[in-house]
Image (spheres, rainbow, N blue to C red):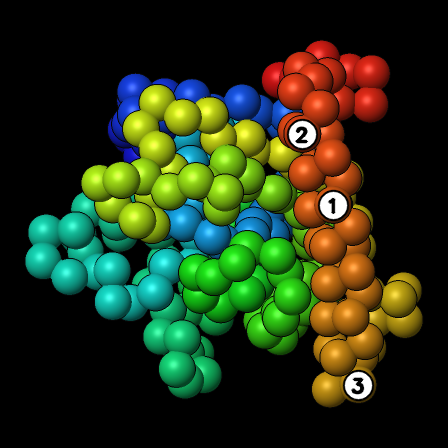
């Protein structure tokens, strides 16, 4: 239900161009690590991902009738200002059941450049063993909507570029603080690299990704 609603809204209000969706594993647990520069990043991924996504969403969004709706479509409330054990448990449950977990590793909306990552992404990846799929959502940073500053212009193109899945760990299976810090550095390097490639790709106006037709 959530995907159908998101597809209708995202394709009705904007013009998403999805590249590399075939890179998302068809089955099994995986984590989508998405840059965060505008308010529609979450709904955009719900509408363009080839599989249903369970996002960790700030608890402030779960107010009024929106709260029950978000929960009904599988989204997870998280308190960003404390160690939210309930949210952590729910997220790990999604991965344990072979689901797709969505995370904004920057923690909050900003420049969307993966310049500063929180440690949660590394923790989930090391704890679950799930691969990370980098995702770049591009199209709103250069030009904002005149109606709502945090949204892309209506009917404007938004590019969603999925990257190659990768493992966050070093193969040793360690979950110490040192291992988490090292994993976070590796993750940031891979995410910023993917973002640079996605910007170069979409700037060329190409409809192909490394020779493969976009899906």
Q: Position of residue 107 (x, y in %)?
A: 49, 67
Q: Quadrant of residue 170?
A: bottom right
Q: Is residue 124 left or right of residue 172?
A: left
Q: Is residue 65 visible?
A: yes
Q: Residue at x 25, y 67 (%)?
A: 60
Q: Is residue 56 above or below residue 180?
A: above
Q: Is residue 56 left or right of residue 13?
A: right
The number of discs equals 3
Q: Which residue is mark 1?
A: 196
Q: Which residue is mark 3?
A: 178
Q: Position of residue 58 (x, y in %)?
A: 34, 65
Q: Are marks 3 and 1 in contact (CB under 8 Å)?
A: no
Q: Is residue 208 above or below residue 39?
A: above
Cα gap from disc 3 to disc 1, whole angstroms: 27 Å
**Which of label 3 and label 2 is nearer to you?**
2
Q: Is residue 84 left or right of residue 98?
A: left
Q: Circle 2 sits in a helix, a strand or a loop, which is it?
A: helix
Q: Which residue is mark 2?
A: 203
């Amino acid at each position: 239900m959530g995907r159908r609603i998101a597809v209708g809204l995202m394709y009705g209000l904007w013009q998403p161009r999805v590249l590399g969706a075939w890179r998302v594993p068809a089955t099994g647990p995986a984590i989508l690590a998405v840059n965060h520069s505008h308010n529609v990043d979450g709904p955009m991924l719900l509408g363009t991902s080839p599989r249903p996504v369970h996002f960790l969403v700030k608890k402030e969004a779960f107010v009024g009738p929106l709260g029950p709706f978000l929960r009904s479509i599988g989204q997870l409330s998280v308190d960003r200002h404390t160690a939210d054990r309930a949210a952590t448990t729910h997220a790990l449950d999604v991965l344990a059941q072979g689901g797709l977990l969505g995370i904004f590793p920057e923690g909050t909306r900003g420049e969307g450049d993966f310049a500063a990552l929180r440690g949660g992404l590394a923790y989930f990846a090391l704890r679950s063993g799930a691969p990370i799929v980098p995702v770049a959502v591009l199209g709103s940073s250069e030009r904002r909507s005149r109606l709502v500053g945090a949204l892309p212009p209506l009917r404007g193109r938004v590019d969603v570029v999925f990257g190659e899945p990768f493992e966050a760990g070093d193969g040793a299976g360690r979950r110490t603080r040192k291992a988490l810090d090292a994993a976070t550095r590796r993750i940031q390097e891979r995410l910023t690299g993917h973002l640079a490639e996605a910007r170069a790709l979409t700037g060329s106006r190409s409809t192909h990704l490394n020779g493969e037709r976009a899906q």
